[in-house]
Image (tube, grey):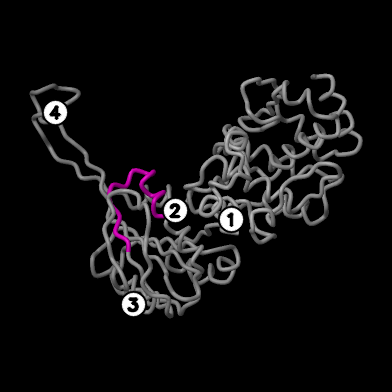
Amino acid sequence: MQSRINKIIERFFVQEPALFTVICSHEIVENDKVRCPVRSGCGRIEYNPAFVKEMTDTALEEALKTEAIRILLKHPYERRPDGCCGAAIAVGSNLAIADNYRFARFYMKMPDDYGLKRGQAYEVYSRQLQDHCVDDPLMEGDANTDLSELWEEDALQVAMINNMIDSIKDWGSLSGDMAEMIRASAKASIDWRKVLAGFRAQVLTMDRRLTRMRPSRRTGFDNMGSLRKFTSKLLVAVDVSGSISSESISYFLGVINSAFKYGLTAIDVIQFEVGITACQTLTQALKSTFVLGRGGTNFQAPIDFAAEYDYDGLVILTDGFAPEPVIPPGFHTHILWVCEDEDCYEAHCEWMTKTGRVCTMKLG
């Protein structure tokens, strides 16, 4: 079995330099427990010998090529969509690959097969599949769940892959458009999840109180010990104006829920357009949401709300299409602008950085 794989890798050396570089960066190992022929993640490419034995050399070559492209796109190591099951992200990744690369003798299902629009990002396909197609027999749950089982955020692998991408000169059968997309993914980018983690630390406050129930580490019960309780008054403002797509608002929900992963125990959430349309305090992740508004946009509304109630931090989820707000005198709230996509970020980051930090959700 290994000899068949070695011959394919030798062909890659001559015909597919980019894919050869990727394959050689990962350990190729046998795994007879996995329910899909080939998968990648955690620095290795695994194959099930029973499945691979039944594959032609051409099919096996195309399967290895698929995993190499998947690694170049960094799907196993970053951008995992929140709230999506393993099958949804696996199929979402496959659709993104099939939509951008034509396999010679190997059929991969296309977005059309699921009734989805072509030309979208992996994350978008994954969320659409999770929302609408998760019970579809085309999803083939067990195999697809296993396909993405090894996927997890890994900054070290991402850095290594980006370095490889920078060094690639010959892209072989990868089209110019796909090569450019891969090169663009290797550029320094802003991820709202990482920014949110840092922002949480920035606005976190610490309440320290003395207590005799907890002894001092150095002197025992002779002196009072102390308890520290971490608290933060965080306000999340969701733009529900008519210019925001329903898909983006649904994704905003994932942004809010992810904040609980970073140690926050309570979050105030407001919806706004020209004014505040809804307000609630969350102590746990939302299971569903409703939207009140869909009119124009006025950023002054959440700014004034944060100032009135003296919040430590304000996260504004928006497309940015509204006049720049006026910051009230004495306003000390830290602001994080989360733009809907890269285009919105490019259009508004200059004025947004005057009042706070700016990042993008990378929706598409």
Q: CA distance from mark 4 to mark 2?
A: 38 Å
Residue positioned most to the front: 137
Give SS at disc 1: helix
- At label 3, the amino acid type is Gly
Q: Which residue is mark 3?
A: 275
- At label 4, the amino acid type is Arg
Residue 256 is one of the magenta-drawn residues: yes
Q: Are marks 4 and 3 in contact (CB under 8 Å)?
A: no
Q: Are marks 4 and 1 in contact (CB under 8 Å)?
A: no
Q: Are marks 1 and 3 in contact (CB under 8 Å)?
A: no
Q: CA distance from mark 2 to mark 1?
A: 13 Å
Which of these two is toward me, 56 or 189? Answer: 56
Q: Earlier in the sequence, mark 1 or mark 3?
A: 1
- Nearest-to-viewer mark from 3 and 2: 2
Q: Which residue is mark 1?
A: 124
- Nearest-to-viewer mark from 4 and 1: 1
Q: Is residue 142 left or right of residue 321?
A: right
Give SS at disc 3: loop
Q: Which residue is mark 2?
A: 254
Rendering quarter of residue 235 = bottom left
Q: Earlier in the sequence, mark 4 or mark 1?
A: 1
Q: Earlier in the sequence, mark 4 or mark 2?
A: 4
- At label 2, the amino acid type is Gly
Question: Which segment did they paint magenta?
Answer: 254-269
Q: Which residue is mark 4?
A: 214
Which of these two is toward me, 93 or 75? Answer: 93
Percent x, y of residue 13: 87, 33
Q: CA distance from mark 4 to mark 1?
A: 50 Å
Q: CA distance from mark 4 to mark 3?
A: 47 Å
Q: CA distance from mark 1 to mark 3?
A: 30 Å
- Residue at 8% x, 30% y is 212
Q: Which mark is residue 50?
A: none
